[in-house]
Each structure stands twice: as structure tokens, then as C-alpha cells.
Image (spheres, helix red, strand yellow):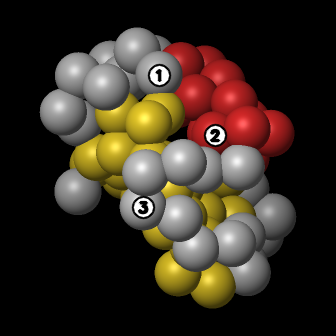
Amino acid sequence: MLAADAPAVPVAKDLTAVIALQGLPCGQVVSVTQKGDNDYIASCQDGNRYQVRVDANGRVVVSKQ
């Protein structure tokens, strides 16, 4: 999925939940760019951007961009 302004709702909701579970500020994901399989850049309504990916061990990793 590649999206700039209107991400697919399930992906945006999933990424919003993952970021919140990590305790990071976001509010709501407003745009998503897919970089690869299970690798996304999520832009939040509060201006924060995060890379959300699954590492080689199957763990979800969220890093600020």
C-alpha cells in the first residue's frame, strides 16, 4: 500500500494502536507510506513520524523519524 493523504483505514488504525502501545505520542496516524513488507512510515496528526517494522525476530519495532 502506498498512500499520501488517505491511508487504508485498517492499516492506519493498526499503526495508531501499535504506536500508542509503545507509549509514544501520536494521536492518530494521518498518512502511511509502505517501505517494504511489514515496514511503514506513519505520519501522525501531532506532527510526529515513526517507522514501524517487524524485525528478523518477529518483534514490532517503532522508531522516531
Q: Is residue 61 left or right of residue 30?
A: right
Please say if the residues under marks 3 and 1 sit with CB atoms less than 8 Å apart: no
Residue in the picture at 23% in, 36% down: 48
Looking at the rendered structure, the kind of residue marked 1 is Gln
Mark 1 crowdedness (10 Å alpha carbons): few <14, some 14-19, many ≥20: some
Figure check: 45 above or below 9:
above
Residue 29: where, in percent of width, then height? 48, 33
Figure check: 20 above or below 64:
above
Residue 45: where, in percent of width, then height? 31, 25
Q: Quadrant of the C terminus?
A: bottom left
Residue 37: where, in percent of width, then height? 73, 81
- Residue at disc 1, secondary structure: loop
Q: Is residue 37 left or right of residue 39?
A: right
Instruction: Depth check: give the residue in front, 27 or 60.
Output: 27
Please say if the residues under marks 2 and 1 sit with CB atoms less than 8 Å apart: yes
- Residue at disc 3, secondary structure: loop
The earlier-in-sequence mark between 2 and 3 is 3
Looking at the rendered structure, the kind of residue marked 3 is Ala
The earlier-in-sequence mark between 2 and 1 is 2
Q: Quadrant of the N terminus?
A: bottom right
Question: Which residue is denoted by mark 2 in the rendering?
Answer: 12
Spatial CA distance of label 2 from label 1 is: 8 Å
Nearer the viewer's eye, disc 3 or disc 1?
3
The earlier-in-sequence mark between 3 and 1 is 3
- Residue at disc 2, secondary structure: helix
Question: Which residue is denoted by mark 3 in the rendering?
Answer: 4
